[in-house]
Amino acid sequence: MRITLIGPVYPYRGGIAHYTAHLASKMLEAGYEIQVISFRRQYPGWLYPGISDKDPSTNPLTVSAEYLLDPIYPWTWWQAIREIKSFNPEMVAIQWWTTFWSPAFAILSWLLQREEIPVVYMIHNVLPHEAKIWDRWLSYIALRKGKGFITHTLREKDRLLNLLPNADIKSRPIPTYDKLPHSRISKSEAREALGLPDKIPLLLSFGIVRPYKGLSVLLNALGILRKRKISFCLLIAGEFWDDKNDYIQQINSFDLEEHVHIEDRYLPDEEVAQVFSAADILIAPYVGGTQSAVVSWGLGFGLPLIVSDKVAAGITEQNLDRVTVVPAGDHRQLAEAIEEFLKKYQVQETIPQTSTNINSGWNDLIHGLVSFTTTGSNT
């Protein structure tokens, strides 16, 4: 079976790029013929709040791709259609995470529909995390052209049904990421490389810092633990898209300066392996959103997790034994969950085992995707 995937891949950075590359590589391993259509430009520079949308990794996860689409230039959309038609796929799967691409994806879907090539949207967020009044309309004009949809949580499925009541939707959790965990190193080696204390429990907050990620909730929780004289270190690893000074003031107000280490930048893949190898637990106290690729990385690296109920729905059942769920925004319950973990803390020098059944998660996602075609088989 031939399938075209449309979405960002390396040299673009971020969770959607990693997801698209993982999906393409797993489909190739399963025997599908895959065409990846990516972007000449992902966003105009003025729109992107980070320093760069390019991945600085020296050994990135890559797949073969054609970089054709530009969100501003419509002639690139027709060029992509010509390349897709020449590949003659039985399906086109489009990554959906931002309404900025709505005009381009709406036209692509309409043109593919005219060619009788079914379009399936893989929904990361029906609406942006900080949605504007026009985002619902932008989502509608593109997504209404989809034959089918993959969502990663039932909550997001309900949001899509609210937008498109007759949508044909399959819900599949984000599978565990297993590419970066192959680069794991020992805890002591990782901490030495990062300049972190060796025998103190290390909490990890990973990813771009945005209000919905709940870092302020985590700092409030750690303020409670600081008053209780509990030993810990927090590593905040990710580029700040929110006002960093607000967090610094919060850290200072709780007397956490000696307990918090900040890496305010996008980490290349080789350093992602370092920080996850160094950590004892990943904490994702999201107050918004519906799922997190960071959580999938944590599972892939074999870490225990404390997550809010905002992202817990995207975690597969076989991993629940390593996951503690707390109510979103409740810093007191988060503090209790962290303290409970720290009471049981022991130095673990061995490299943890990765999550089991990694391939079965990807296979389930792929089978759900291809079931929207008439054959639903790669034979």
Image: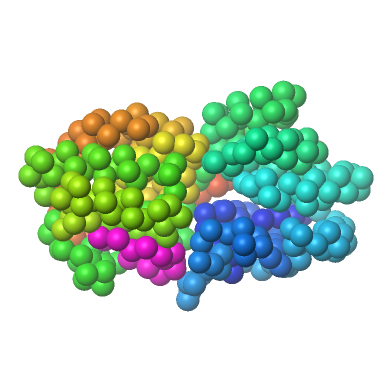
Q: In the rendered view, tell whether residue 57 sits above or below residue 252.
A: below
How are the colours assigned in the image?
rainbow
- Residue 328: image location, x then y, percent: 37, 32
* 255 vs 338, nearest the viewer: 255
- Residue 362: image location, x then y, percent: 55, 47
- Side (left or right) of 241 relative to 348: right
Is 266 one of the magenta-colored residues?
A: yes
- Residue 44: image location, x then y, percent: 66, 62
Q: Residue at x 83, y 59 (%)?
A: 74
Q: In the rendered view, tell whether residue 154 sits above or below residue 71.
A: above
Location of residue 367 (image quadrant) = top right
Location of residue 337 (image quadrant) = top left
Is 335 one of the magenta-colored residues?
A: no
- Side (left or right) of 7 relative to 180: right
Magenta extent = 261-279
- Residue 21: image location, x then y, percent: 59, 59
Q: Residue at x 49, y 72 (%)?
A: 56
Count the labels in the image. 0
